[in-house]
Image (cartoon, rainbow, N blue to C red):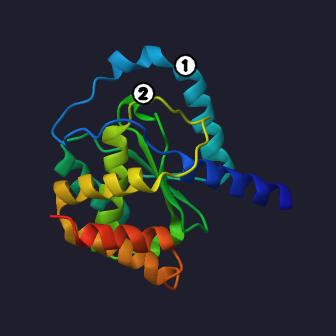
Amino acid sequence: MLLVSVRFAVGVRIIAGIILLGSMLAPQETFSASAHIAKFNVQEQTTCEEEMLATSGGREVVRGKVYNVLIQVAGRYGRAIPHIYTVPGSMNMAYIGASVAVDVRGKILVGQQAAERFGPTALTGFFAHEMAHLVSDNETLGCNDYIVRDPQIEADADALAARTIGKRPVEAFLARVLALTKGQNWDAKRRLEVLRHFN
């Protein structure tokens, strides 16, 4: 049991740590997977994603509240609907770096607790933030790469999300994270302050 908990924690930390590096793309730009696939090993990426999903217990969602919100957000970005996986008992949310190279859609993970505790507006803001990472992912870092979260990259994803769907859902997402953490998430607090000054 402890081994599973440790693996789960490590898997969640890896997922949470995978972030984009590179320039922000406008939401209307399209992605050409074939132009980027040669940069890294797609088979290795696929294997890593499968192991990560198995370790975390992630289950793909293809209908329901969470999926319906994602459909709306993907449409605003003009993108295919990413695969969405819920992770049991978790509050974490993330996208899998370079997952767009595997099938162009990409993969987003949302903790089951977060999905249950976020209202439609906050959930829209969350998905818009994760979609910003997906559309900006230049595949320099894949599933096996672990890096520390960069607060500026997170703020850039918030800004792209706000430009794409409006500030209100992104603010609702960050405010909900703060409420659920009883104001103890300094990153969400700082990002919310930055976003409130965003035009």
Q: Amino acid under label 2?
A: Ala
| Circle 2: element type | helix
Residue 165 rendering spot, x and y as whole percentages: 18, 59
Mark on residue 141?
none
Q: Please determine whether, in this image, residue 71 is positioned above or below residue 116.
A: above
* Label 2, label 1: how far apart the Cα atoms are: 10 Å
Q: Quadrant of residue 167?
A: bottom left
Q: Which residue is mark 2?
A: 101
Q: Please rate how many residues cluster around mark 2, counting C-alpha atoms within 10 Å: few if below 14, some from 14 to 19, many from 20.
A: many
Query: Which quadrant of the view contains residue 3?
Result: bottom right
Q: Is residue 64 visible?
A: no
Q: Please give left or right for residue 62 compared with residue 5 in the image.
A: left
Which residue occupies 31% across, 58% down? 158
Q: Quadrant of the C terminus?
A: bottom left
Front in this rendered view, residue 191 or 177: 191
Q: Quarter of the image for the N terminus: give it.
A: bottom right
Could you tell me which residue is drawn at 36 percent across and 42 percent down? 134
Mark 1 = which residue?
Answer: 41
Q: In the image shown, does 120 or 128 lie closer to the viewer?
A: 128
Indicate left or right for 75 with 111 as reference: left
Toward the top, the furthest residue is 38
Residue 10 in sight here: yes
> Which amino acid type is marked by label 1?
Asn
